[in-house]
Amino acid sequence: MTCWIPGIQHRQNIMEIFTLEERAQCLAKRNRKLMSSSVIFIDEMGKVLILETIYKEHWEVPGGGIEENESPLEAAIRETKEEIALELKDPRLVAVDYRHTQVGKEEMLHFVFFGGILSKTESNMIKLQADELSAYKFVNLKEVYSLCGPGIGSRVERAIEALKSNTCIYWDSR
């Protein structure tokens, strides 16, 4: 790795030659992408769980930003517990969505996990995070697009296709 830091002689191998302070300066200049994890739950009828937020105009699927030193899986587990009070068991990564920088939106990596099929009993155990969420419901894919918007709608659709084909997919969103 090559790194240029003003006032510091150029060095070829950052890991072996730079001091810890010099390495920290170099790494601080690197691009940092925002990251989030979301979790797709479906009910026994094949409908998708969506959440109405109190701070956005569109509905969402469970999930949120990945915190510092938190893995995408850890974020999915934490966000599920915080938002709907369910313990996420054996989540499966089904998709990674890379979003290029857009007007009003930052470059971002979205990790999409499948949380499972919720029984009626499990669905009745959902308790919403009162300071962020006002409602939840299970909807078909057309309603996901309508209520969540095309970004989340297409992410959910591709995740469901990955589930059906027992794969994990990656895509670039523009």
Image: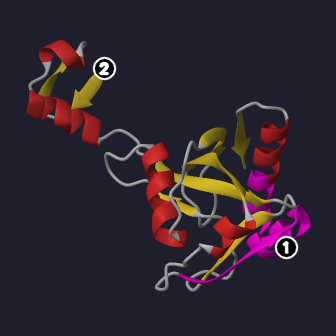
Q: Of the residues shown, which amino acid type is indicated by label 1?
A: Ser
> Mark 1, mark 2: which one is toward the viewer?
1
Residue at image position (63%, 47%) is 112
Magenta stretch: helix, strand or loop mostly: helix
Residue 60 seen in render: no
Q: Which residues are magenta?
A: 133-156
Q: Which residue is mark 2?
A: 2
For mark 2, give the secondary structure.
Answer: loop
Side (left or right) of 143 relative to 138? right
How many numbered marks are there? Answer: 2
Between 129 and 13, which is closer to the camera in this rendering?
A: 129
Q: Position of residue 74 (x, y in %)?
A: 43, 48
For mark 1, give the secondary structure.
Answer: helix
Q: Compared with residue 168, is residue 148 higher up or lower down, i.e. above or below?
A: below
Label 1 packing within 10 angstroms: few (<14), some (14-19), many (20+): few
Label 2 packing within 10 angstroms: few (<14), some (14-19), many (20+): few
Q: Does the magenta-highlighted stretch encompass residue 136?
A: yes
Side (left or right) of 172 relative to 8? right
Alpha carbon distance from label 1 to label 2: 47 Å
Q: Position of residue 133 (x, y in %)?
A: 56, 81
Mark linked to residue 86 = none
Q: Does the magenta-highlighted stretch encompass residue 145?
A: yes
Q: Position of residue 89 (x, y in %)?
A: 55, 48
Q: Compared with residue 124, is residue 97 higher up or lower down, i.e. above or below?
A: above
Q: Of the residues shown, which amino acid type is indicated by label 2?
A: Thr
Residue at image position (25%, 28%) is 4
Q: Compared with residue 71, is residue 117 higher up or lower down, i.e. above or below?
A: below
Q: Which residue is mark 1?
A: 146
Between 159 and 174, which is closer to the camera in this rendering?
A: 159
Q: Quadrant of residue 124?
A: bottom right
